[in-house]
Image (spheres, helix red, strand yellow):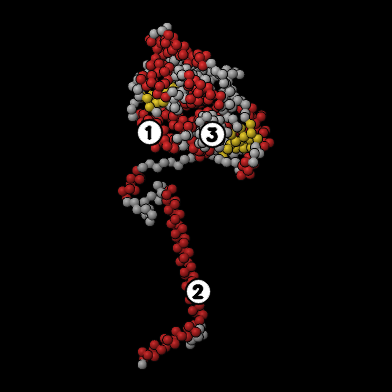
């Protein structure tokens, strides 16, 4: 009975609660308070959990960046490293964070767009000039557009060849550079509302202050559609010359893909001893443009002539090849190159790296050079086809590889003083006056003809070549200045003497 009554009482109490009644009038209020407190407790727990997980996520992210200094050794649910790995990591020196130069603050006078023309090294020098001009006009430069319409038809964009982020950030203390125009101005340009013009060649910086800056201030955006040799070699303020060097030797860095492949080629060459880079400028476009046909057969001469007439921007059409060669205005042929290398006593055990495109005439024209120097190599013979797959049909990226190898060679030997030869020569001077053999082609072709005709014996020929080039090996020298004839004077980028050591007083004059 007692147990039955107890159960009955409990049942009645439960029923009373469910109905909101009961023996005491305050039972319902207590239940409501209990529900409210439970809800608050649940909300506090949920909020705390969210906050804790947020902190864990934030600490994990911070740990990835600052771990070596702050969170080293902290346990993590995302990694399972034992103590031995931590000890090894502690011994590896951390790479210091890159310190960016402070931004230069200036009133922006407008925007400068530039379209470069020519091959890689012509564009490289032009980019240096255009950045310098933008800096001294206090304008914002848009990342330069590369030439896609020249003979090489390379579709590469700036960022395909150069490290664009490094380019922008490394120069931020000099000039503001943007990847694109602001949207409002971009729409104007896309509809053709932009002032476009070619600046005058070999101009002083004063020309850009007096003629170009007012146009930028008037139109907000000016597009310079030609950029080759648009800034004078000489007579510029020292700060301008030094900035041109800084851009060339520091800001213009190739992409990591090009840099890494270049290093691999250099390492492969170094494993087999000394090497010479032979910039054998004997490709079809060079011969067609220059009209130099020494050693070509009748069919080849006709093919080169047709090509020259096919390109309207190659202004010179009727060319006397023999006369041009005697004036020293033609690249050496592969056969002539072999003779000069031998005359200079270049060891035939050296590797000869051919920094060039496809040699016109192929194996037939290369036969004498290959016989004299059997260790002829190219990037295509050193690397696997898969290594160069991404570089195919991108001549400027291929030229970038050759440029890197040229800088590191024991001797750089250009057979023609084109843009590649000049820019690499200047860069090698900057790297410590590395030996670059600068050929006096006018003298050499005369010596070659005398030797072939029997007027000079081999020893006489060899001695004459060596004596005449003793001072033409990239030593410190003053840049030749010819007022009012800038095309005939020394190119700034071939000998940027303002940026080189030793000082000017130690330079010899030519």
Coordinates of residue 245 in the picture (x, y in percent): 52, 29
Query: Which residue appears at 44% of the width and 60% of the height?
Result: 52
Q: Is residue 135 visible?
A: no
Badge number at residue 36: 2
Query: Which residue appears at 35% of the width and 22% of the height?
Result: 374
Q: Nearer the viewer, residue 372 or 309?
A: 309
Badge number at residue 148: 3
Q: Nearer the viewer, mark 2 or mark 3?
A: 3
Name the residue carrying label 1.
383
- Relative to residue 28, is residue 185 depicted above or below? above
- Relative to residue 466, is residue 361 depicted above or below? below
Coordinates of residue 196 in the picture (x, y in percent): 64, 34
Query: Which residue appears at 46% of the width and 20% of the height?
Result: 415
Label whose residue precedes the other's in the sequence (2 or 1): 2
Q: Determine whether, in the image, residue 218 is placed left or right of residue 408.
A: right
Q: Nearer the viewer, residue 65 or 479?
A: 479
């Amino acid at each position: 009975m007692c147990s039955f009554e107890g159960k009955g009482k409990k049942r009645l109490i439960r029923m009373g609660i469910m109905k909101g009644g009961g023996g005491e009038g305050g039972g319902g209020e207590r239940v409501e308070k209990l529900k409210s407190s439970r809800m608050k407790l649940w909300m506090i727990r949920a909020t705390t959990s969210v906050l804790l997980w947020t902190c864990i996520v934030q600490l994990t992210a911070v740990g990835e960046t600052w771990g070596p200094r702050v969170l080293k050794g902290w346990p993590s649910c995302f990694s399972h490293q034992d103590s031995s790995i931590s000890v090894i990591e502690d011994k590896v020196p951390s790479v210091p964070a890159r310190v960016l130069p402070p931004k230069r603050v200036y009133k922006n006078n407008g925007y400068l767009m530039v379209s470069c023309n020519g091959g890689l090294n012509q564009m490289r020098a032009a980019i240096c000039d255009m950045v310098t001009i933008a800096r001294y006009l206090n304008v914002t430069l848009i990342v330069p557009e590369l030439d896609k319409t020249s003979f090489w038809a390379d579709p590469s964009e700036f960022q395909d060849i150069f490290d664009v982020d490094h380019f922008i950030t490394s120069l931020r203390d000099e000039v503001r550079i943007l990847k694109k125009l602001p949207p409002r101005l971009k729409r104007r340009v896309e509809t053709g509302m932009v002032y476009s013009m070619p600046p005058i060649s070999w101009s002083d910086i004063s020309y850009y202050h007096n003629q170009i800056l007012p146009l930028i201030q008037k139109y907000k955006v000016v597009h310079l559609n030609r950029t080759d040799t648009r800034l004078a070699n000489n007579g510029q303020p020292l700060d301008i010359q030094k900035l041109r060097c800084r851009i060339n030797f520091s800001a213009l860095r190739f992409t990591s893909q090009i840099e890494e492949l270049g290093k691999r080629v250099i390492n492969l060459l170094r494993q087999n001893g000394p090497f010479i880079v032979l910039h054998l400028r004997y490709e079809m476009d060079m011969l067609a443009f220059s009209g130099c046909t020494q050693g070509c057969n009748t069919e080849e001469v006709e093919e080169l002539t047709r090509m020259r007439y096919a390109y309207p921007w190659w202004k010179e059409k009727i060319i006397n090849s023999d006369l041009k060669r005697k004036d020293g205005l033609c690249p050496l042929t592969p056969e002539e190159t072999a003779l000069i290398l031998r005359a200079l006593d270049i060891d035939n055990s050296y590797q000869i790296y051919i920094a060039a495109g496809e040699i016109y005439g192929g194996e037939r024209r290369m036969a004498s050079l290959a016989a004299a120097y059997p260790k002829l190599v190219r990037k295509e013979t050193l690397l696997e086809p898969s290594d160069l797959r991404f570089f195919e049909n991108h001549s400027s990226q291929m030229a970038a590889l050759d440029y890197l190898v040229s800088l590191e060679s024991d001797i750089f030997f250009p057979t023609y003083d084109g843009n590649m030869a000049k820019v690499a020569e200047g860069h090698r001077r900057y790297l410590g006056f590395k030996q670059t053999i600068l050929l006096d082609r006018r003298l050499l072709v005369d010596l070659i003809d005398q030797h072939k005709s029997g007027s000079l014996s081999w020893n006489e020929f060899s001695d004459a070549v060596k004596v005449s080039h003793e001072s033409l090996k990239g030593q410190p020298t003053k840049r030749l200045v010819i007022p009012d004839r800038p095309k005939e004077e020394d190119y700034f980028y071939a000998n940027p003497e303002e940026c080189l050591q030793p000082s000017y007083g130690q330079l010899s004059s030519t």
